[in-house]
Image (tube, rainbow, N blue to C red):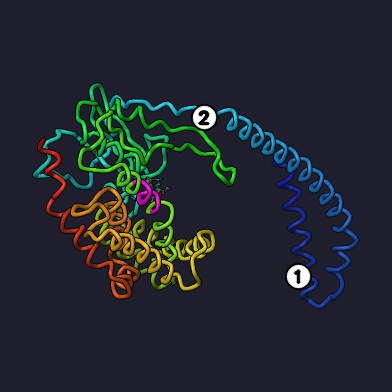
Amino acid sequence: MNAARKLTRFAERARFLKKYYFTSQNGIIGIPGSFCTMVQQPQRTHGLVKLGVIGAVTGTAVGAGYAYYKINEARENIALEGTQLETTLLKYKPPVTPSRKIASPVDATGLKLTLFQYQTCPFCCKVDPVLRKEIGWSSYKKVPILLTKVEGGYQPLNDSTMIVSLLASYLHDTSHKIEELANYYPSVAMHDENGNFKYEIINKYFLMFNKQLPKDRSMNEITEERNWRKWADEVFVHTLSPNVYRTLDESYRTFNWFSEVGQWKEYFPTWEQMLIVNVGATAMWLIGKRLKKRHRLKDDVRQSLYDEANYWLRAIKARGTTFMGGSKPDLSDLAVYGVLKSIEGCDAFQDLLTHTNIGNWYNAVKEQVETHSGSVNLSR
Ligand SMILES: N[C@@H](CCC(=O)N[C@@H](CS)C(=O)NCC(=O)O)C(=O)O
């Protein structure tokens, strides 16, 4: 009823407006003015006041509701602090077709693993779909996620560092089941240093040695490995985005490379692939500038990348070994390698090879990875 009345009034006004508009066009100057001031203006004032009141009331109600929701959410989050996020076993594997299957020629563990990842995400590359519908089944919304087939279902493992620590713990002592080990890495509710609420796996850099410390490694080496892994996540990785999205041109080249290695043309319709490249390249170029500030990179962001790479290389040099782990890469070598591998096709990576000596170390790790040199630890 109300809507019909409004529509009729609108039609009437439109007719009125049309009439005076044409009159004005015909040279009767001032009519539209009087039309406005004498006829329309009082009505508009009423309308405006009414609209203003409605707006204010609605705004206040929505604002109050939102504030109440936020305050409540903050209170609930504080109450959650220190509590553990329940991890549930999936009864069935989510119905997602893997984009590739890898059968390792040297794997003797019998583990059946499904990795949800972005091909060029630095966190994912540490462990090895752009619109993320593939992880719709998960309440954790980041990748990588590793789904492990266990007795009675599938155990999701979230967070690259936790995945690496858990698998390394498993390989150290296979007598513990994956799902048991997962219980040793609880996600605990907390607020970070900026007051943001999050779940964090506080011990994710720790391996579960199960009272059997590795015989060939000192406590100092184990602690160092942990610290360098943390450095890879908290410092080194933050030099990447501002570098690979440094200019709009560079950002486009980076996204085209992502599209190539992620085979986006194969997995997405053309419009989606083009949308991701165009929107992604522009958005990331803008976001890259913010990240540069947030992580206090130098004006010339390349320099920050080189500085951190040199910091890493100096530490290896001080050890006098090929890798941080000695004659074989340890988990910190693999973490830094993974982070860099994610930008292998970018200008920034080529510049890094030209301006630092990281190439020797990088290629040495690459050779170890590609020849599965770590597999000697699997055949015990
Ligand atoms: N701490 C996490 C960070 C993972 C992360 O931030 N992943 C990004 C991709 S590089 C992500 O999934 N972001 C959420 C999104 O894409 O919406 C880890 O190490 O796994």
Residue 116 percent coordinates (x, y): 30, 43
Asked which quadrant contains residue 136, the reply is top left
Q: Nearer the viewer, mark 1 or mark 2?
A: 2
**Does 274 sit left or right of 367 as displayed?**
right
**In the rendering, which numbered label is found on residue 22?**
1
Tell which of 262 and 218 is nearer to you: 218
Tell which of 77 and 313 is nearer to you: 313
- Placement of the N terminus among the 4 image quadrants: top right
- Placement of the C terminus among the 4 image quadrants: top left
Q: Disc 1 beta carbon < 8 A from ligand 1?
A: no
Callout 1, which amino acid?
Phe
Residue range highlighted in magenta = 226-231
Name the secondary structure under disc 1.
helix
**Does 194 sit left or right of 92 as displayed?**
right
Main secondary structure of the magenta stretch: helix
Callout 2, which amino acid?
Gly
Among the two numbered marks 1 and 2 on one chain, the one whose residue lies closer to the N terminus: 1
User: How many labels sit on residues?
Assistant: 2
Name the secondary structure under disc 2.
loop
Q: Which residue is mark 2?
A: 82
Q: Alpha-carbon neighbours of circle 2 within 10 Å: few (<14), some, or many (≥20)?
A: some
Give above or below for 324 relative to 380.
Answer: below
Give above or below for 109 relative to 376.
Answer: above
**In the rendering, which numbered label is found on residue 297?**
none
- Residue at 71% of width from left, 41% of height from top? 63
